[in-house]
Amino acid sequence: MTELKSKPKIKIFSLNSNQPLAEEISKEVGVELGKATVKRFSDDEIKISIDESIRGDEVYVIQSVSDPVNTNLMQLLIMVDALRRASAGSINVVIPYYGYSRSDRKARSREPITAKLIASFLEMDGVDRVIALDLHADQIQGFFDIPVDHLKADTLLANYFIENGITEDLVVVSPDHASVSRARRFAELLHAPIAIIDNRDPENINTIPETVIGNVKNKRAIIIDDLIDTAIKTQISAETLKDAGATEIYNVATHAVFSGDAAQRLENSPIKKTIVTNSIDIPEDKRFSKLEIVSVGKLFGTAITLIHNQESVGKLFGHDE
């Protein structure tokens, strides 16, 4: 007689966007990465095969929707389809960086809400749960009708300053009015006041705002944002804080998109250190001497373990959700 199993086996698969982080997560959970092959046809179509049985298993797929964004998104959708057709018990996607998240509302007429479109794709594909990190806007969780575990990296990033003894004379700075709530949360972790750069045109490199709301003179200023793309806004913020009398300037963000010459821009700016996570795999040619990388591998690994054990992920935030 066949023995009944009380709990499904856990399997973790990694696609191509962030293999080093996937290896960290699997090590934290205590299981080896599953075997899968990602190939391309001559016309660039993606072909994926799962090289082991996953029937009835609780499967986690790790994929950042980062550069090349469309390729990585298609890999994820194709992988989910393969898992569903191979009779996976449940399909959970771990998205350290959720691409297209900046299109989260209609800012003007005739614009798409692409973040919602991606959510619809994932649900129609058969995903049972999403585990994401520092979404560009919290309301993206509401774009899904399936469970979404929205992890935060702010505690890990704040610990960088605590562990390095950078705790005196701090002020947390929002680079524009849109990031004030994020700055306030980060400031609470460091028991610091906040300031706001009155930047009405964040992407115009020729305009350095003259007004900083709050006191930054003779302070160590920490610029906080969810991602760094071109780094133009960050550079403008650093120049503004320098002119306003900040003694040291730090730059903190979860997602290091680093498009174009962003790395060089940050290296040549008045910023002393740029602290990011490894939610996006940063290639060697985009790393620079002022860059510090904080790992989120343990955070994701713990979240997966809690979910598998049917425990509250709210423990990661110091409370029960």
Image (cartoon, rainbow, N blue to C red):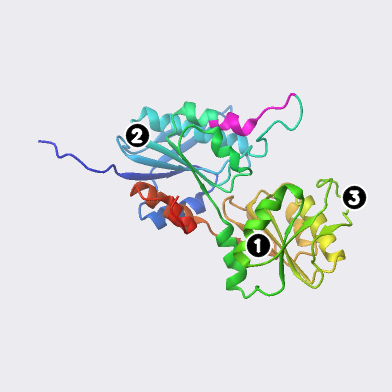
Task: Confirm or deny contact between disc 1 and disc 2 (CB under 8 A).
Answer: no
| Residue tagged 1 | 187
From this viewpoint, which residue is outermost toward the top?
110
Mark 2 burial class by Cα count in 10 Å: few <14, some 14-19, many 20+: some
Instruction: Tell me the tag on residue 88.
Output: 2
- In the rendered view, tell whether residue 311 sits above or below residue 274: above
Task: Confirm or deny contact between disc 2 and disc 3 (CB under 8 A).
Answer: no
Q: Indicate which disc, 1 or 3, sits on the residue closer to the N terminus.
A: 1
* Separation (CA) of disc 2 from disc 3: 53 Å
Left or right of residue 265, residue 43 in this image? left
Between tags 2 and 3, which lies in front? 3
Q: Indicate which disc, 2 or 3, sits on the residue closer to the N terminus.
A: 2
Q: Position of residue 204 (x, y in %)?
A: 85, 46
Q: Circle 1 — which element?
A: helix
Q: Position of residue 220 (x, y in %)?
A: 74, 70
Q: Tell me the residue at 39%/33% (across/down).
A: 83
Regarding residue 248, the answer to whether it shows in the image is: yes
Left or right of residue 225, residue 140 in this image? left
* Separation (CA) of disc 1 from disc 3: 29 Å
Indicate the amino acid at tag 3: Asn
Residue 114 is one of the magenta-drawn residues: yes
Q: Tell me the residue at 65%/30% (across/down).
A: 113
Q: Quadrant of residue 135?
A: top right
Majority secondary structure of the magenta segment? helix
The boundaries of the magenta stretch are 110-119
Q: Circle 3 — which element?
A: loop
| Residue tagged 3 | 206
Residue 16 is one of the magenta-drawn residues: no
- In the rendered view, tell whether residue 273 sits above or below residue 305: below
Regarding residue 294, the answer to whether it shows in the image is: no
Indicate the amino acid at tag 2: Ala
